[in-house]
Image (tube, rainbow, N blue to C red):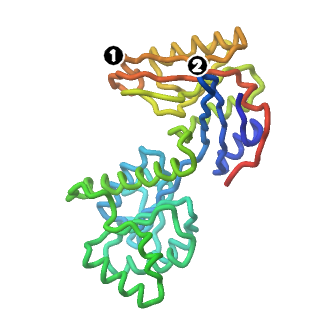
Amino acid sequence: MISMCGDKNDLFAGYTAGKTFDITFRVPGEPEQKVYVRRFQSPVRLIILGGGYVAQSLCRFASALEFDIAVADDRPVFANTEVFPQAKNVLCDTFPDAIAKLRITDRDYVAVVTRGHKHDADCLRIILRGNMPEYLGLIGSKRRVRGLFDMLTDEGFSKELLERIHTPIGLPIGAVTPDEIAISILAELIQCRSRRMLSRGGEILEQTNVDPSFLGYLSSSEEKAVAVVVERRGSTPVRTGAIMAVNRLGQTFGTVGGGCGEHEVVTAALRVLRTGKNELITVDMTNDIAENEGMVCGGKMHVYICRGEEMFAGNYGAART
């Protein structure tokens, strides 16, 4: 059984508008069924305040890990799309004005990596008076940060609020170079994002983004089967939550990793369409090569395959923004 927030057209329109939807897969099993939640969520926004070398490295690495990136700096030589080609939005403005234009929400991740104490203070004053983002990190030495926090405390900001700032920014991995510092920051962002997902239910599958072709096809009336990776062990080309639709011609929309493993899933999906019976299959990828990833896999994936119309049956709820 599958329950979903909204109908198939709501899912496509809502996702493209930045809303969040859940599909719940109830997979029969012994001694009891297992429940998996596939969240459809647009990439979270990472706001990088500062355009120096650490910011450039952070933008480059984060763009590959499902973050929509906005960058702000007051220097035209840094705040441009040539320096930040991966950023979705680049603002050249004073930090207070840029922050006002960005309209930070409680879903955003913010990294303050400016070039000086004054600019750090300007950023924090605006952010702390508004919506507190999901993550707020500040670069700087302990001495520099201590002095800044003392000043903000004197200005009336509470100790409890300042303690929510991640500083020194990043995980303690002994980072020295801009690339290393960016990686340490990104590791902390991933850690924060993972904890956020777990706090909302450990059954939520890892992958929350989706191929637009999958959503587009899902809204069609054509008969289809839907395959979702619900568990994995060892090295696999995709995470749990990877999802794909298959029609009666064997055409696919989305992916569960490509290669021989995906071919096995397509074969099972055609069988589901033929018999009308949902299946939970195990794809053994030991010594297989993931075609699209160029990597050797040595793990197993459990893939649940169901008829597409079941995704739109049952109780509906409103989409979350």
Q: Compared with residue 310, is residue 46 higher up or lower down, i.e. above or below?
A: below
Quadrant position of residue 300:
top left
| Pointer 2 residue | 280
Residue at 57%, 35% (x, y): give it.
211
| Pointer 1 residue | 287
Residue at 43%, 45% (x, y): give it.
65
Location of the C terminus by quadrant is bottom right
Residue at 46%, 62% (x, y): give it.
135
Q: Compared with residue 24, is residue 223 higher up or lower down, i.e. above or below?
A: above
Give x and y (percent) for residue 218: 69, 30
State the SS at label 2: strand
Within 10 Å of disc 1 (Cα), the crowding (few <14, some 14-19, many 20+) is: few
Quadrant position of residue 228:
top right
Give x and y (percent) for residue 46: 47, 57
Return the residue nearer the eye: 215 or 287.
Answer: 287
Task: Look at label 1 and name its amino acid.
Answer: Asn
